Image: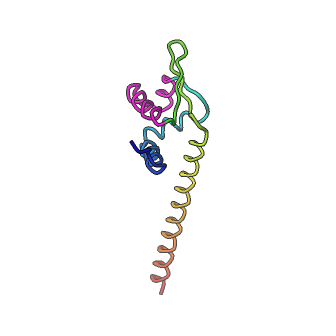
Amino acid sequence: MPARSIFEMQAEMCKTMGNAVRLKIVHALRPGPLRVSEIVQATGLAQAKVSQHLSVLRAVGIVTTERVGKDVICRIANPKVTRVCDLMREVLVEQATQRSDIVQAIQDADRALQNR
């Protein structure tokens, strides 16, 4: 059986992170480890939904879990994951700024034409 390519592995991780609920969970875990019940509280999601998505995040190595007594403690497996999220948000802000600049340029052009 041939080994998976780096592109396939990267695509799997991006696919996993391409879900708003999972991003919300990752964001909740940014400050540090949380119990599943704390993730439920922080995200406002149902416990079953949180558990389901944590399972997917765990399967690709984005999140790790540890049982401590009755609690399951979750944490980001690698802090670089949060850096990737930060970079994506920066890209989104830059795109929004560019769109805003384009909208402003169109509005300025329309006003200039109306004032003729």
Which image quadrant is residue 52 in? top left
Which image quadrant is residue 4 in? top left
Q: Position of residue 116 (x, y in %)?
A: 47, 87
Q: Residue visible at 53% across and 38% down?
A: 27
Vertical relation: 75 (above or below) 6: above
Q: Position of residue 36 (x, y in %)?
A: 49, 24
Q: Position of residue 18 (x, y in %)?
A: 43, 46
Q: Residue visible at 56% across and 42% down?
A: 81
Q: In this view, which residue lies farthest toward the front? A: 1
Q: Quadrant of the N terminus?
A: top left
Q: Position of residue 13 (x, y in %)?
A: 46, 44
Vertical relation: 101 (above or below) 89: below
Residue 59 part of the magenta-drawn span: yes
- Main SS type for the magenta part? helix
In the image, which residues are magenta?
A: 36-60
* Residue nearest the viewer, comparing 4 with 105: 4
Task: Give the number of callouts.
Answer: 0
Q: In this view, which residue lies farthest toward the top? A: 69
